């Protein structure tokens, strides 16, 4: 079988999309209205064939006359009106039980993306070295790993043990036209909402808004449950739990804030500090396995958990927290040096020295150094 790859920026690829829409929707080139509709669909789909195909299906289900009316009423919203129509018609298309499950799936993905955005915006703690947000997350949201998505949807138990419920796999296939799936060199596939205008539609929908808030509470509770269990165990943190920690803990505070659940917020106040201790334990275990001082990115997350209250300037933090930050910077510098990243290692070590020197100047006159 031959596999062809298309450069999405080339004119040939654009013409392929246009030809597809002409054939699927019975449009005519050269017709002003049809040319405009083709351009709207491709723009809303960000030029991705899978999204173009999804929107073409929406257009066929709705009828071209109704589609044109929707776009005329919302000229600046491109695909949003089509997404609203699709969301409203899930029961008609899949039945009430499956529609309910699809909404929960979308809510979990939306909550994870919201939480990720919060970490880099409202909830950002500035790195003492370069001011970028302190987190082990990459700035681009690449989605939730399949195993974590299944866990958050309680679809990780199958006959004979654990795994991914085949019904979840079927569901992901059914709505693949709105999702982005990526392996990114990892052992598991990650999923996120693919259509950029769909997330605001989900957030604006009253029912989906409630589901997204519940998904935040579920994500935060899952993180706190994991931290509590690992805190109570003496055994080495396994690979699966280590992976779950690195997905859930960076999003924990964000989901507490965005979910708005008072019971979850109260639990976070009581137990949230354990997350830092568990990450420190994981770092020690990584070091024992020959990973130097652990993963540099994990030290960034440890520092973020030290930084309270959110929004405080470095020198306004309590002495103990500043000292912990300096220690984590030192460890991150060692980890980076082990990885061969000497320039950033030196920057970390210099920043740690600067913080500790400021502490010395503050404490020495009081005889507390």
Image (tube, rainbow, N blue to C red):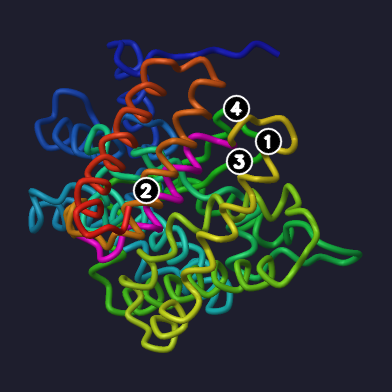
Q: CA distance from mark 3 to mark 2?
A: 34 Å
Q: Is residue 130 left or right of residue 321?
A: left
Q: Quadrant of residue 188?
A: top right
Look at discs 3 and 4 and give the one toward the viewer. 4
Residue at image coords 64%, 60%: 150
What kind of element bears circle 3?
A: loop
Which is nearer the eye, 22 or 168? 168
Task: Please say whether residue 296 is one of the residues in the magenta stretch.
Answer: yes
Do tag 3 and tag 4 residues touch (Cβ < 8 Å)? no
Q: CA distance from mark 4 to mark 2?
A: 32 Å
What kind of element bears circle 4?
A: loop
The x and y percentages for residue 153 are 59, 68
The residue under label 4 is 185
The x and y percentages for residue 165 are 73, 61
**As drawn, which residue projects farthest toward the bottom?**
263
Q: Is residue 335 left or right of residue 362?
A: right
Using the image, determine if residue 342 lies above or below residue 283: above
The residue under label 3 is 189
Q: Is residue 247 left or right of residue 142?
A: right
Residue at image coords 35%, 71%: 88
Give the magenta-colored segment's residue range. 294-311
The residue under label 2 is 325
Do tag 3 and tag 2 residues touch (Cβ < 8 Å)? no
């Amino acid at each position: 079988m031959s596999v062809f790859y298309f450069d999405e920026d080339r004119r040939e690829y654009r013409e392929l999309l246009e030809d597809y829409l002409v054939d699927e929707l019975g449009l005519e080139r050269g017709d002003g209205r049809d040319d405009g509709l083709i351009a709207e669909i491709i723009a809303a789909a960000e030029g991705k064939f899978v999204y173009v195909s999804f929107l073409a299906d929406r257009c066929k289900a709705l009828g071209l006359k109704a589609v044109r009316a929707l776009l005329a009423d919302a000229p600046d919203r491109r695909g949003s009106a089509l997404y609203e129509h699709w969301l409203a018609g899930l029961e008609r298309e899949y039945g009430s039980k499956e529609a309910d499950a699809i909404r929960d799936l979308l809510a979990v993905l939306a909550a994870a993306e919201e939480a990720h955005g919060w970490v880099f915006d409202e909830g950002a703690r500035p790195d003492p070295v370069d001011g970028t947000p302190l987190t082990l997350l990459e700035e681009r949201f690449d989605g939730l790993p399949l195993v974590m998505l299944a866990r958050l949807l309680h679809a990780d138990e199958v006959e004979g043990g654990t795994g991914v419920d085949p019904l979840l796999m079927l569901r992901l296939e059914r709505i693949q036209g709105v999702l982005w799936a990526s392996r990114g060199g990892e052992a598991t596939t990650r999923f996120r909402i693919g259509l950029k205008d769909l997330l605001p539609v989900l957030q604006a929908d009253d029912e989906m808004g409630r589901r997204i808030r519940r998904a935040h509470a579920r994500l935060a509770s899952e993180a706190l449950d994991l931290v509590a269990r690992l805190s109570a165990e003496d055994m080495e943190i396994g690979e699966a739990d280590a992976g779950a920690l690195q997905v859930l803990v960076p999003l924990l505070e964000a989901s507490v804030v965005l979910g708005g659940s008072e019971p979850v917020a109260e639990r976070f106040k009581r137990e949230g500090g354990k997350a830092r201790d568990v990450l420190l334990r994981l770092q020690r275990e990584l070091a024992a396995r020959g990973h130097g001082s652990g993963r540099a990115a994990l030290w960034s997350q440890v520092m973020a958990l030290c930084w309270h209250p959110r929004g405080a300037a470095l020198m306004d933090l309590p002495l103990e927290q500043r000292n912990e930050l300096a220690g984590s910077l030192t460890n991150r510098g060692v980890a980076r040096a082990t990885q061969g990243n000497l320039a950033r290692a030196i920057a970390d070590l210099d920043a740690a020295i600067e913080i500790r020197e400021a502490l010395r100047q503050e404490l020495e006159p009081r005889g507390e150094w």
